[in-house]
Amino acid sequence: MNVVTRSAGIFLLAMAAIALPGCRPASQPSGQIITLRLSGWQSNPNEKQRLDYLLRKFEKTHPTIQVKYETINSEYMDVIKTRLIGDVAPDVFYLDGFEAPLLMQYQVLEPLDRYITPEFNLADFEPSLLNAFRYRNQLYGLPKDFSTLALIYNKQALAAAGITHPPKTWAAFTVAARKLTVDRNGDGKIDQYGFGIAPELARQTFMIKAFGGQLVDQNGFATFAAPNSLRGLELIVNQYRRDRTAAQPTDVGATWGSEMLGQGKAAMVIEGPWSIPYFKETFPALEFGTAEVPAINGKPGTMAYTVAYVMNRKTRHKEAAWKLIAYLTGKEGMKAWADQGLALPARRSVLGELGYDKNTLYAPFVAGARYATIWQAGKHLPTIRMNFNNQFISALLGEQPLSDAMQRAQDTANREISWAN
């Protein structure tokens, strides 16, 4: 058993040990001020400013509740898990859908169903986002926002290549990538690649499913080495190795796909809505457009990522914690949070009020919510992700065939899952 698996096993045992009846809510004498602790992370400086603004508004309308917000940007979930084990976790905290199954299973979160009233209008949320935080018919989190992936392209590059509109199928996408791959000096060095890829499982799961493959089976074991799963991944590997029309960010001195596009080193990328404010701030001269991810095997596909507010089951201020969650995920709070365009609001009504579904840049991301694969696959997804990423990059670099790499990754992941179980 390796170090990662041992650590996971220790955490699972600790979670099982603290899955005991929760603390009785503390009674609050009339007029007494209580302090709630809220933890999250910050991916953009504007996020903290906006959240601080919302928390001050909440405090004005709830004068007996103060909120102390803590930003945890390094090893966020490790910190949260450690604090849960030590019984010093915050009252309310962010939870990524990717990590939710583990915490829901071990009952360290407060179920929210009994707090939700008809006026809260739970039906306003995108159902797939809510389902990411359900376990055994109980709801443990309310999504604050979500992101999908869409095709983002350099308009001038497409026009120069004689491409009049973004490709709608993967076959057309492959052809477009060839036209957009340019060696301007004729020295054998590619100056612009057609496609900038992100070779990680969080971006490739919908490719695995394109031909009927699955990431995991019903028992949570990895199945991505099956022939149907490999067919979608082969499309990416072939563009990178055989056609030489795709590049990773590290190949061209960039840190991520949208930086490649902004620098002119890739003409097309598949990225999230966070790229739109990034381009406007960092590459204001870039003329870019967005479109839905090209259909594969005749089917639309993309990824969706969501984060919820959840309540620590052992908080002594449950009613106050619910009031905070309800405000932040209600129409007013969500509208104020989501108007920057870094992510999309989880409420359909707010999406409409902010006009994201009518905005030409954001509409493809909104459309993708209907058919997106949620980035979630049980409590062992971190183990599966680590093994997939290591071996997929190896196959991409030609160090081993894709089928061998994926079989090796799957076998290793499933051994570690068996040990953890």
Image (spheres, rainbow, N blue to C red):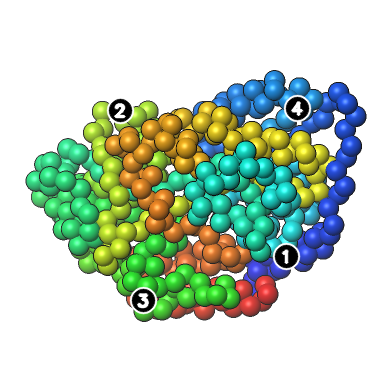
Disc 4 marks a residue whose amino acid type is Gln
Location of residue 131 in the rendering, given as x and y in whole percent from the top left corner: 56, 56
Horizontal side of residue 1 vs 27, given as left or right:
left
Amino acid type shown at disc 2: Pro
Answer whether labels 4 and 1 touch (C-beta < 8 Å): no
Q: Which residue is mark 1?
A: 12
- Name the residue type under label 3: Asn
| Picture residue at 26% right of the left edge, 32% below the top | 286
Residue tagged 2: 284
Residue under circle 3? 228
Q: Nearer the viewer, mark 3 or mark 2?
A: 3
Label 4, on which residue?
66
Measured in 3D between alpha carbons, the distance from the residue under mark 3 to the one under mark 2, in whole angstroms, is 42 Å
For marks 4 and 1, the one nearer the N-term is: 1
Q: Quadrant of the N terminus?
A: bottom right
Residue type of the residue flagged with mark 1: Leu
Res 362 → quadrant: top left
Residue 189 shows up from this direction: no
Q: Is residue 355 left or right of residue 26?
A: left
Q: Quadrant of residue 265?
A: top left
Q: CA distance from mark 1 to mark 2?
A: 47 Å
The tag earlier along the polypeptide, 1 or 3, is 1
Tell me where residue 133 appears, x and y as whole percent: 60, 54
Badge 3 crowding class, 10 Å Cα cut-off, few under 14, some 14 to 19, many 20 or more, is: some
Name the side, left or right, on which 192 lies relative to 36: left
Precedes in sequence: disc 3 or disc 4: 4
Q: Are marks 1 and 2 in contact (CB under 8 Å)?
A: no
Quadrant location, the C terminus: bottom right
Q: How many angstroms separate mark 4 from mark 2 (CA)?
A: 40 Å
The first of marks 1 and 2 along the sequence is 1
Please, what secondary structure does the residue beneath circle 1 have?
helix
